[in-house]
């Protein structure tokens, strides 16, 4: 299969700058957890360097201490490892704070920056006002002497000014048609109580993204700066700053970002969902954060397969959630074992079998013989899905009903329902009676038209394994939550999670758990894919599942990764 690096946009990028030693970087801001959109940036930057035998750095863009926390630094690094990539170096913009300050002073000396004391409203007016409604004009501080700006800049560092009272601005081109050239901020003053995760209270001023990003690229020797098209307008200021300081300028190329419909990816909105208890946390399996997808059980290689399938171009990629689900489903279909699991158990008593009857039935883990087989007990009492029994039969119904014969997966003979019992209080069916083999006592056995999955009662074999199953549907009712007249929160789907407390899994689960992650071909395993969610299996006729971190020695908790086929009823 062709990769995104040997043809198309990224192949052309390399042809434009066939550097002998390729260096790229992935530069996240450590103020939140990564989401599915970041998977494309990770795959592009790390994969491009790897494909060309180069290096990719993980550089934390930690230039704004507000919101930057240790948990986000750790989560970002863990997520990159989980996806199968290893940074050649881990760096921080803050590694260069002293160097960046020196470069800012150098920029002032070259008449490329000045200290400005204008208010937000004044700066907005200088840039043409609301939607360019008035002519642009230069800041009154733009022509101040270089020495004066140097003194004021050092005064900013020493704490003379409060936030908003002074800022260092680049002296670019206010007449340019590109807003990224309208004397952007290079340094700003943050609140005195804004403590930086790495440098503490050492700095009162911090470089902006527009100042630090390109200079850190240059300092680190990045050969190919790959970012999304939302930063395309920034390329002019990127090159302007490097050239103004006579620094090496990396090549920049922009590609279209990845958007997923039917969800929200904004850190602010996800935080609101978490804070209001609508979801369990940033790793809730209904979210499209990468830690949420990981907890749901989505394999890292399925995500990388998805990125490769959608490709990389300049155009923004807007993908429906169903497309991602289908890629995950296809990947799981050939890589995980199959087990029998009953979500809503209905006991079936086979009356013509003795109470101590046990037959070990050999069941394959997959259609692929290399997965192997396992034995499960078949006994007098078993459990089927409640939805697989109907008290009134009909000609087009092929599952179990009184007088109806069905097969049981891998069991030698079929069973025929004979009667059922109800709960005297609510009338609910609580037990079905059946016979095994010929229903009329003779030698002839009807050929069943349907086969059901099942789990037997056998305490001696530890069967069934009792579990809580969580079924996740779309967190929102529509593909565009933002369009809801009542706001995006009004679009939340109240049926986004179903919790089934009485699910039962067959005993082959124990072997699946001990051998996880699957497949067992070591060259394809991702060493970081080793959490509880790496225990994945197809529950036959039900869906794909993974073990959740809430599992304990007393109780297994599993999450549905995806259904067996696209479910049009996921939104309600």
Image (cartoon, rainbow, N blue to C red):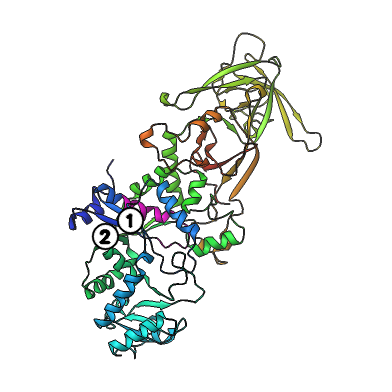
Vertical order, 120 against 450 (above or below): below
Residue hosting label 1: 57
In the rendered image, residue 7, in percent from the top left (x then y), is placed at 23, 49
For the point 19% across and 55% down, which residue is it?
19
**Total tally of numbered discs in the picture:** 2
Residue 151: image quadrant is bottom left
In the rendered image, residue 226, in percent from the top left (x then y), is placed at 29, 59
Vertical order, 33 against 177 (above or below): above
Vertical order, 206 against 561 (above or below): below
User: Of label 2 and label 1, which has the lower sequence position?
Assistant: 1
Whether residue 222 sits left or right of residue 206 in the image: it is: left
Q: Quadrant of the N terminus?
A: top left
Q: Is residue 143 magenta?
A: no
SS at circle 2: loop
SS at circle 1: strand
Residue hosting label 2: 222
Q: Nearer the viewer, residue 260 or 435?
A: 260
Q: Tags 2 and 1 in contact by the CB under 8 Å rule?
A: yes
- Checking the image for residue 303, the label placed there is none
Residue 227: image quadrant is bottom left
The region drawn magenta spans 28-46
């Amino acid at each position: 299969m062709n990769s995104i690096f040997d043809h198309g946009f990224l192949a052309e990028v390399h042809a434009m700058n066939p550097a002998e030693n390729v260096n790229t970087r992935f530069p996240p801001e450590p103020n939140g957890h990564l989401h599915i959109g970041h998977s494309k940036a990770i795959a592009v930057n790390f994969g491009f360097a790897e494909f060309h035998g180069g290096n990719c750095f993980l550089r934390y863009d930690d230039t704004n201490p507000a919101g930057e926390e240790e948990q986000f630094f750790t989560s970002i690094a863990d997520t990159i490892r989980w996806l199968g990539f290893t940074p050649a170096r881990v760096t921080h913009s803050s590694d260069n704070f002293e160097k960046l300050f020196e470069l800012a002073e150098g920029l002032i000396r070259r008449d490329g920056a000045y200290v400005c004391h204008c208010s937000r409203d004044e700066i907005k007016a200088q840039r043409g006002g609301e939607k360019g409604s008035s002519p642009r004009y230069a800041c009154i501080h733009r022509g101040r002497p270089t020495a004066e700006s140097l003194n004021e800049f050092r005064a900013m560092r020493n704490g003379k000014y409060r936030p908003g009272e002074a800022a260092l601005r680049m002296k670019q081109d206010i007449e340019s048609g590109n807003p990224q050239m309208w004397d952007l901020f290079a340094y700003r003053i943050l609140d005195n109580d804004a403590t930086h995760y790495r440098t503490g209270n050492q700095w009162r001023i911090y470089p902006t993204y527009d100042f630090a990003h390109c200079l850190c690229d240059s300092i680190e020797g990045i050969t190919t700066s790959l970012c999304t098209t939302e930063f395309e307008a920034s390329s002019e200021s990127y090159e302007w700053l490097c050239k103004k300081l006579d620094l090496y300028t990396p090549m920049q190329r922009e590609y279209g970002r990845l958007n997923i419909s039917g969800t929200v990816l904004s850190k602010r909105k996800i935080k609101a969902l978490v804070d209001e208890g609508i979801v369990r946390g940033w790793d809730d399996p209904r979210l499209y954060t990468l830690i949420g997808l990981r907890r749901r059980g989505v394999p890292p290689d399925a995500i990388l397969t998805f990125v490769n399938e959608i490709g990389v171009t300049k155009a923004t990629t807007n993908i429906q959630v169903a497309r991602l689900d289908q890629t995950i489903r296809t990947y799981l279909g050939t890589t995980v074992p199959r087990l029998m699991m009953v979500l809503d158990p209905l006991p079936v008593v086979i009356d013509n079998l003795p109470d101590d009857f046990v037959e070990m039935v050999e069941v394959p883990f997959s259609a692929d013989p290399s997965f192997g087989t396992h034995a499960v007990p078949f006994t007098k009492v078993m459990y089927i899905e409640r939805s697989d029994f109907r008290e009134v039969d009909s000609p087009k119904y092929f599952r179990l009903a009184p007088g109806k014969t069905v097969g049981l997966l891998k069991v030698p003979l079929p069973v025929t329902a004979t009667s059922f019992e109800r709960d005297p209080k609510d009338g609910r069916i609580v037990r079905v009676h059946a016979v095994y083999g010929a229903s009329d006592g003779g030698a002839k056995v009807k050929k069943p038209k349907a086969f059901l999955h099942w789990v037997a009662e056998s305490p001696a074999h530890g069967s069934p394994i009792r579990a809580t199953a969580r079924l996740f549907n779309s967190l929102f009712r529509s593909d565009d939550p933002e369009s809801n007249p009542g706001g995006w929160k009004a679009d939340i789907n109240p049926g986004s999670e179903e919790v089934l407390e009485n699910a039962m899994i067959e005993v082959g689960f124990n072997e699946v758990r001990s051998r996880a992650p699957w497949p067992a071909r070591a060259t394809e395993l991702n060493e970081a894919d080793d959490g509880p969610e790496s225990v994945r299996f197809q529950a036959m006729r039900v869906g794909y599942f993974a073990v959740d971190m809430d599992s304990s020695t007393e109780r297994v908790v599993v999450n549905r990764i995806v259904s067996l086929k696209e479910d049009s009823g996921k939104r309600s």
